[in-house]
């Protein structure tokens, strides 16, 4: 029984390690998501600034070439924004998959913990049952000795067992 408990405890430890590895992956993916969000915010502010620069051309004389370059800059920023949004969607899909795997690992650990606890409880119960049987055997043996009068060692009933006095 002890070997079985040890074997399943090792399996439990492996499953806990798998769960911890998934937690590490999830943390890395969340950091990646934060970095992508930060980059998107940066690009949005760049786009806002580029649009302001583009529309502010009425105050000063701007050549057609400058207008074209400003428009190209806005388009490049929009392209980067679109790529960033796709990146963000990919990261969020990976996060969802990792969360599902983590949930499954957590369930596996919980099931295995319950099984190992049940094995330990059964082993303790079996140990106490055997111990109780041994105590019962000792009690029956002492009672049998006392009842037949063959000995009273350790019972504290010397001499008074058959109604006589110890005088």
Image (cartoon, grey):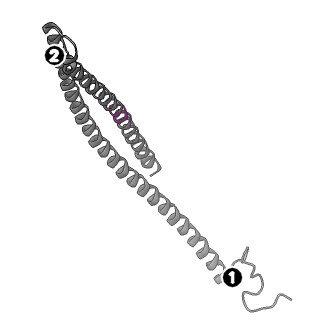
**Residue placed at 16% from the left, 14% from the top?**
72
Q: Which mark is residue 149?
A: 1
Residue 18 to residue 120: above or below = above
Q: Residue furthest right?
A: 167
The answer to whether 68 appears left or right of 37 in the picture is left
- Which element carries disc 2, helix, strand or loop? helix
Kindly indicate the quadrant of the structure image that contains residue 14: top left
Which region is colored magenta? Answer: 24-30
Kindly indicate the quadrant of the structure image that contains residue 65: top left
Q: Which mark is residue 8?
A: none
Residue 25 to residue 159: above or below = above
**Residue placed at 73% from the left, 73% from the top?**
154
For the C terminus, the quadrant is bottom right
The answer to whether 152 appears left or right of 60 in the picture is right
Residue 36 to residue 105: above or below = above
Tell me which numbered mark, 2 or 1, is placed earlier along the sequence: 2
* Label 2 environment density (alpha carbons within 10 Å; few <14, some 14–19, many ≥20): some
**Residue placed at 16% from the left, 19% from the top?**
75
* Label 1 environment density (alpha carbons within 10 Å; few <14, some 14–19, many ≥20): few
Q: Nearer the viewer, residue 113 or 53?
A: 53
Residue designated by label 2:
71
Q: Nearer the viewer, residue 134 or 144?
A: 134
- Which element carries disc 1, helix, strand or loop? loop
Q: Nearer the viewer, residue 11 or 43?
A: 43
Q: Position of residue 3 (x, y in %)?
A: 45, 46
**Residue placed at 55% from the left, 65% from the top?**
131
Residue 101 to residue 34: above or below = below
């Amino acid at each position: 029984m002890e070997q079985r408990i040890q074997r399943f405890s090792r399996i439990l430890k492996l499953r806990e390690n798998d769960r911890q590895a998934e937690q590490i992956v999830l943390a890395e993916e969340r950091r990646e998501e934060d970095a992508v969000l930060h980059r998107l915010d940066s690009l949005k502010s760049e786009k806002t600034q580029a649009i302001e620069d583009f529309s502010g051309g009425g105050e000063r004389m701007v050549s057609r070439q400058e207008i074209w370059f400003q428009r190209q800059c806005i388009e490049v920023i929009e392209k980067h924004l679109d790529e960033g949004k796709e990146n963000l969607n990919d990261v969020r899909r990976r996060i969802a998959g990792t969360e599902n795997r983590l949930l499954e690992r957590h369930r596996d650990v919980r099931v295995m913990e319950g099984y190992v606890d049940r094995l330990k409880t059964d082993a303790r119960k079996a140990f106490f049952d055997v111990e109780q049987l041994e105590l019962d055997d000792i009690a029956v043996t002492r009672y049998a000795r006392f009842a037949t009068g063959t000995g009273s060692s350790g019972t504290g009933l010397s001499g008074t067992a058959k109604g006589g006095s110890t005088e």
